[in-house]
């Protein structure tokens, strides 16, 4: 089989021919039809995570056909079309991941390959209404958005939601999920074009967060928010508190802009604002997410599709930060 390997930090991915995989007890080998990129793949290549052991095959998202299963696994999975839950060994507590938790693609070899070996418990049937490329785009970002909105923020129909930094996979899924759940949904972006595209998906409107008084302009348009979903943090996080209704919830799953400065905790406690951290999701979250996607016929937004041989070019496309939707590799 072919697999794309990261052999050195900041080095291009190298596609090599290697031996086919064998399923260990409790595992399945999935013959991948498509895989999708996430920012963690780019950040791993750039060396932004500690203790990276090389060489490694990146990739957390994948969809394909089960080729074989190991001992102690149900043989009925063989031949089935599946997607992969990349959240490995979550643990027994649905509130938070356990000490053995990890995400497929680091430190375990991931989906930038023609085959991947994963626990059978991390397989789920491929949604029938989705293509292979769309199915591969779903797992990590869809799971992250689902847990943020419904498990952590407990979003209800009729509430007003703000999704910051729309354009990436998790933010777009949050937009699609919130709209499907009956929420009035607004967005921010640094790109007017991305705001316009979000509106075609059902967003009520949006503002450019690079504008000097973007928060004030947004409040005049929309009013304050019941739920805000953020993955950037940074100095703009303080403005999110100003935009939150009393008793509202801010749920965040990243800090790409760094830690916030000038955070006024008095506003948080006096206005009963809930600050909720989240990451990925539990097996129950994944099952809930896939049911929701099938019920509402959610279709992931795809930005661009590359062949596996061009996996490094796909990462360079992600690094350019112009994407709107998921970037996908096909085997």
Image (spheres, helix red, strand yellow):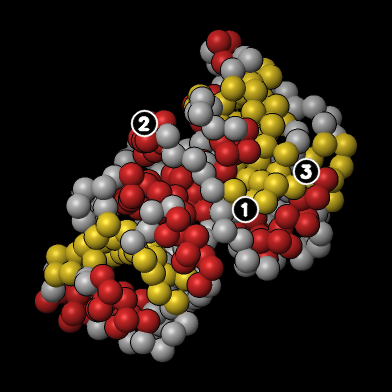
Badge 2 density bin: few <14, some 14–19, many ≥20, Cα 10 Å: few
- Circle 1: element type: strand
Residue closer to the observer: 90 or 242? 242
Q: Is residue 120 left or right of residue 290?
A: right
- Circle 2: element type: helix
| Residue in view at x 24 percent, y 66 percent | 225
Residue closer to the observer: 260 or 173? 173
Residue closer to the observer: 130 or 282? 130
Q: Can residue 281 be seen at all in this image of the molecule? A: yes
Q: Is residue 140 above or below residue 313?
A: above
| Residue in view at x 78 percent, y 43 percent | 308
Quadrant in which the C terminus appears = top right
Name the disc covering residue 295, or none.
2
Residue 259 placed where, x, y %? 43, 77
Residue 278 placed where, x, y %? 37, 55
Mark 3 or mark 1: name the one nearer the start of the chain.
1
Badge 1 density bin: few <14, some 14–19, many ≥20, Cα 10 Å: some
Mark 1 in CB contact with mark 2 (< 8 angstroms):
no
Q: Is residue 250 above or below residue 292?
A: below
Look at mark 3 in the image and give the residue it sits on: 308
The quarter holding residue 207 reads bottom left
Q: Is residue 7 left or right of residue 243?
A: right
Name the disc covering residue 91, or none.
none
Mark 2 or mark 3: name the one nearer the start of the chain.
2
Q: Can residue 252 be seen at all in this image of the molecule? A: no
- CA distance for labels 1 and 2: 24 Å
Residue 163 placed where, x, y %? 38, 62
User: Looking at this rendering, what residue extends furthest in the right direction?
Assistant: 17
Name the disc covering residue 303, or none.
1
Quadrant in which the N terminus appears = top right
Residue 26 placed where, x, y %? 56, 22
């Amino acid at each position: 089989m072919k697999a794309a390997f990261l052999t050195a930090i900041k080095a291009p991915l190298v596609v090599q021919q290697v031996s086919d995989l064998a399923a260990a007890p409790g595992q399945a080998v999935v013959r991948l039809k498509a895989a999708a990129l996430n920012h963690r793949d780019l950040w791993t290549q750039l060396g932004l995570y500690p203790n990276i052991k090389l060489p490694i095959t990146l990739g957390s998202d994948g969809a394909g056909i089960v080729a074989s299963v190991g001992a102690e696994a149900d043989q009925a999975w063989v031949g089935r079309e599946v997607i992969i839950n990349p959240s490995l060994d979550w643990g027994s507590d649905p509130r938070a991941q356990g000490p053995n938790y990890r995400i497929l693609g680091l430190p375990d070899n991931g989906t930038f390959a023609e085959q991947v070996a994963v626990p059978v418990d991390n397989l789920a049937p491929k949604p029938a209404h989705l293509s292979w490329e769309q199915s591969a785009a779903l797992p990590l970002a869809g799971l992250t958005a689902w847990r943020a909105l419904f498990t952590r923020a407990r979003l209800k129909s009729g509430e007003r939601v703000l999704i910051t930094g729309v354009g990436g996979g998790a933010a777009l899924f949050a937009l699609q999920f919130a709209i499907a759940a009956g929420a009035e949904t607004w967005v921010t972006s640094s790109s007017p074009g991305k705001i316009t595209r979000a509106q075609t998906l059902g967003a009520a409107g949006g503002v450019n967060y690079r504008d000097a008084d973007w928060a004030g302009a947004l409040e005049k348009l929309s009013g304050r928010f019941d739920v805000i979903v953020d993955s950037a943090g940074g100095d703009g996080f303080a403005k999110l508190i100003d935009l939150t209704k009393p008793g509202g919830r801010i749920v965040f799953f990243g800090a790409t802009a760094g830690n916030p400065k000038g955070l006024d905790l008095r506003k948080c406690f006096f206005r009963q604002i809930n600050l909720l951290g989240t990451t990925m999701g539990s097996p129950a979250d994944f099952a809930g997410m896939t049911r929701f996607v099938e019920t509402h016929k959610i279709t992931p937004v795809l930005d661009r599709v590359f062949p596996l041989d061009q996996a490094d070019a796909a990462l360079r496309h992600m690094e350019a930060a112009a994407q709107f939707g998921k970037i996908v590799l096909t085997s």
